[in-house]
Image: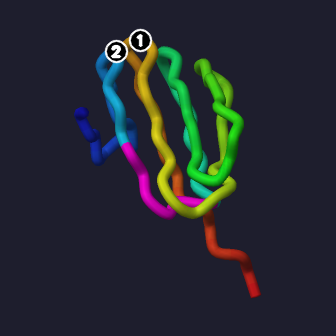
Amino acid sequence: MELHLKAPLIALAPGEVIALDDVAGATIKPTRGTVWITEEGDTADFVLRPGERRVVQNEGRTVVQAIDCAWISIRESLPEAA
């Protein structure tokens, strides 16, 4: 995994996996390549391609795996205004 701090992107090699814990509300968006996503507490799996996004619905572990060379951005949810 390669993390670019200036441009918040993570590069994943084919088959590479990252596990994210307790990121409900975060948005995962591939900018290149295809990724598979599964969330703890959800029986559905999701395959995303560039231009698609997934907002994580559940706390617990979220697993993202690159199907091919992929670049993804992960953005935390913004706090709601009072």
Q: Is residue 19 left or right of residue 5?
A: right
Quarter of the figure with the C terminus: bottom right
Give above or below for 62 relative to 70.
below
Which residue, given by chain and number where applicable, does mark 1 sit on?
Answer: 68
Which residue, given by chain and number where applicable, does mark 2 sit on?
Answer: 14
Is the residue marked by circle 2 packed among few (<14), some (14-19), or many (20+) residues within 10 Å? some
Say which element carries label 1. Answer: loop
The reply to whether callout 2 and callout 1 are in contact (CB within 8 Å) is yes
Is the residue marked by circle 1 packed among few (<14), some (14-19), or many (20+) residues within 10 Å? some
Give above or below for 75 relative to 53.
below
Quarter of the figure with the N terminus: top left
The percent coordinates of residue 41 (x first, y second) are: 64, 53
Say which element carries label 2. Answer: loop
* Residue interval drawn in magenta: 19-24
* Whole-number angstrom distance, CA of label 2 to CA of label 1: 4 Å
- Write down the quadrant of residue 67 in the picture: top left
